[in-house]
Image (cartoon, helix red, strand yellow):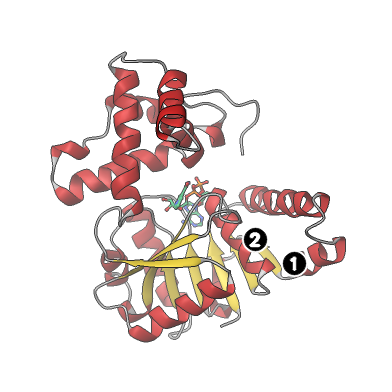
Amino acid sequence: MDRIAVIGAGQMGSGIAEVCIRAGFSVMLIDQTVDLVHRGVAKIEQNLDRQISKGRLTTEEKQTCLDKLLPTTNLNEVQNADLVIEAIVEQKQVKEELFAQLDVIAPPATIFASNTSSISITSLAAVTNRADRVIGMHFMNPVPVMKLVEVIRGLATSEETYQRVIEVSQRLRKEIVEVHDFPGFVSNRILMPMINEAIYAVYEGVASPKAIDEVMKLGMNHPMGPLELADFIGLDTCLSIMETLHEGFADSKYRPCPLLKKYVAAGWLGKKSGRGFYEYRSGV
Ligand SMILES: NC(=O)c1ccc[n+]([C@@H]2O[C@H](COP(=O)([O-])OP(=O)(O)OC[C@H]3O[C@@H](n4cnc5c(N)ncnc54)[C@H](O)[C@@H]3O)[C@@H](O)[C@H]2O)c1
């Protein structure tokens, strides 16, 4: 297992590609346009340069890493992959269409892992003819910094697939926690309702975003406030996760806050678009 295709060169895909090349894997980084792929590569280079400035990486090591990276818009490159890690937008239908396409292109033995935050791995597996080789590999943001990978088996995921993904995660020096296939898994079943509640507090005029974040940081010892974190994750992703929880559990306690919907409709997606609950000088 040496060749990994990462699909989606956004915040998560670029981070996943970065940890993979640093662990010595050959990586194809795939997105829809040349600009999007370049944005992902630029982010990787920026992070590697930061490591050089901290004395944790040499210029030669940076080059060795970049030599392992193939940035491309050609999905057919997955023909050469042992493992595909999907990190595209958090939309079930879009992911299902991609998985069906990948199933036709990739060799039968290739494992498909999804970095989805909330969508059923069993459903993604069901659109392929390799349900035993589909699994959830949920990295945390920022990928090069955060230790955890939530590993989620779909109903039909084989033990062999699970073991191979554990081996890859260990090579990436990540800590693995196995969870079952339920909407939002563990991380977002707990985190996202808290973020949504913080948005309700803004919506209802309980306090300003800054005040809410200060309460959670100073009072609860959270390293980031929930609204700062929501901006960092991406408000479109937060909304999609809440919708998956709401639909999946059919429970009104997961209804997304109307203010979250309004921000996403306005294109205020958080840090990546330059504006969310806070304003940012430049995007990602
Ligand atoms: N943002 C987070 O904190 C976080 C954390 C863990 C997991 N995730 C999950 O990771 C995934 C990606 O999130 P992100 O924050 O990187 O989003 P993002 O918006 O930064 O990036 C998504 C990328 O996918 C690309 N894309 C969309 N459709 C595509 C397709 N059909 N083929 C190829 N590329 C396509 C887009 O062009 C974009 O570059 C989502 O499933 C999200 O839920 C996000």
Residue 42 is labelled as: none
Element carrying mark 2? helix
Q: How many marks?
A: 2
At label 1, the amino acid type is Cys
**Residue 48 vs residue 179, the one in the foreground:** 179
Q: Position of residue 145 (x, y in %)?
A: 59, 53
What percent of the width, then of the height, locates residue 263? Answer: 40, 26
Res 262 quadrant in image: top left
* 59 sits to left or right of 107: right
Q: Looking at mark 1, is its residue's CB closer than 8 Å to ligand 1?
A: no
Q: Position of residue 9 (x, y in %)?
A: 58, 54
Q: Quadrant of the N terminus?
A: bottom right
Residue 252 at x, y percent in the picture: 14, 37
Q: Residues within 10 Å of mark 1 (few under 14, many from 20)?
A: many
- Which tag, 1 or 2, sits closer to the chain's start? 2
Image height check: is 66 above or below 15?
below
Q: Secondary structure at mark 1?
A: helix
Residue position marked by numbered label 2 in the rendering: 18
Mark 1 touching mark 2, by CB under 8 A?
yes
Instruction: Examine the rendering and report whether any part of residue 152 can be seen.
Output: yes
Three-letter amino acid code at disc 2?
Glu
97 shown above or below 79: above
Residue occupied by mark 1: 65
